[in-house]
Image: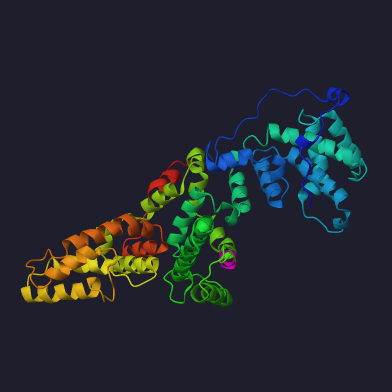
Amino acid sequence: MGSFPSAAAKPEANPAEAASTKPTTKKHDQAPTHFATELNTVCYNYLKAMPLPRVLESDVGRRLFGVHCAEIKKKDVARVYFALQAKWQALKQPSNNNNSSDDNSADLGQLEAAVTNLASTTRLSNATIGLLRIGLNANGSFTNEDDLLAMMDDCMKALRQVEAEHWPRSSAGREFMGKTLKFELMLRDDMAMCFFHQFLVQEYSSENLEFIDMVNSFDDNYDSLSADDQVAAAARILKLFVDENAPLQINIPSKIRVRLERKVSKDKEAPKDLFRAAKSEIVALVQRDSWPRFLKTPNWAAYLDYDEVAARTASAQARHDIYLDFIGDDDLTAILSHELGREYLGLYVVIMALQPEGSVDFLHHVMTFGMVQNEKEADEMRREIFARYLAPSAIAPARCVSPQTSAVIASQLETHQGNTLFDVAATEVRSYLEDQMVPQFKRNGMYAKYRILVGQSQPIKRKGSLAQAMDKRPL
């Protein structure tokens, strides 16, 4: 179905027609006493910017705008417009005329009542009222396309003056936004994805969005990477989301999984469209599963009520800051104090390194070593730490420790007294983790899993922007 004509596409009325138009009253219709949406919010500005003819092109738009008109007790002009719209569509697509319609706006009795009510007002011109009566007298036959367009144009002008004024602040408008905005179109909206991410974390299903985000980053940075770096970036995505034992495994068909693993792991290739099929599967899954549930939550309402300027100027960093305020912002010491924190951070570091890496375990064991009082036990632990993490043949090397530091430790391994032997190496590891790994880890779903599991006895509380956005909604 083609787009319905808008008022902007029509030429100005000729003087004769203008003379037949009743003068417009200056009396303003009383505004609703309560608005579902505040001014200058995401929802308000989205609906305000959308041309009314575009809203009324879709079935859901016509239905919800009709609901809004009924709520403000101004449904007659909308009813006439919808009836004329149906007649215009029938002229343009006569093959569809055999289908019966349940649309009340097409009912001649209701249309006649609406015309009768409008005839005593200044909402529509005399010319429009006259053409409507002629059509009604002909048993609802409106066959002149020019007349239909002229009447629709007149109705649209009337709707813009009254009914559309408070549409951006109505509850029906909020519902329209939720029913028409698709997940895929919102992916690049950092603030929308911030609130969606919070919702997914509470549902324990954030890996789908995190996979999409990581694939988008892969696509965005692809041309700036060398061939080896492209393969390495693809391999990290596979290890996080695709492999059989991936910590954030996504649900994709086995044939796609096998093809990805063969391309990256065996062929050592990573074309730019490598993840296209997998991403399409996950986007479709989110659109039909998580996204509709999200639209019914306080998280979605918080996004609609978010300040428009702040939302449009939000960066990925702002999204991340709000997310951390919601999920919890642990530093390295707090992460290492939990067994789950060490496990998830350690696994993340290994995946990023794409090879054995023991920096997290090394730092934890050095902290434990510093508290050992028994000299014999300390000697055994000192040798074990060096052999496992710093020796040339270490099975879990702390790769960020410089060779010079490792050499100094090796030379003092048998003679050093006290528990400070590994202090310099521990400082190097801590700097590496704090500066490089922990910031990345906090952007990954593995951090969310750690925070959720640690906080299961104390459920995550909504904080920060979500609570603020909810608090400012009218009671």
214 sits to left or right of 165: left
Tell me the residue at 89%/43% (across/down): 142
Question: Is the image coloured rainbow, by chain, by secondary structure, or in one colour?
Answer: rainbow
Residue at 26%, 76% in the rendered image: 393
Examine the rendered structure and indicate whether residue 111 appears above or below residue 282.
above
Can residue 61 be seen from the camera position used here?
yes
Residue at figure coordinates x 41%, y 52% from the top left: 323
Q: Nearer the viewer, residue 121 or 372?
A: 372
Along the viewing direction, whichever of 319 and 23 lies nearer the viewer: 319
Left of 172 or right of it: where is 221?
left
Q: How many marks?
A: 0
Q: Position of residue 10 (x, y in %)?
A: 81, 34
The percent coordinates of residue 235 (x first, y second) are 46, 69
Name the magenta segment's main secondary structure.
Answer: helix
Residue range highlighted in magenta: 277-282
In the displayed structure, does residue 331 sit left or right of residue 13?
left
Image quadrant in which you'd find residue 331: bottom left
Rendered image quadrant of residue 114: top right
Please state the horizontal and vertical placement of residue 334, each as a whole percent of the image.
Answer: 26, 59
Q: Position of residue 299 (x, y in %)?
A: 48, 52
Residue 76 magenta: no
Toward the viewer: 40 or 128? 40
Is any atom of residue 306 visible in this view? no
Q: Quadrant of residue 429?
A: bottom left
Q: In this orientation, which residue lies closer to the viewer: 185 or 69?
A: 185
| Residue at image coords 34%, 62% | 451
Q: Is residue 279 found inside the magenta-colored segment of the image?
A: yes
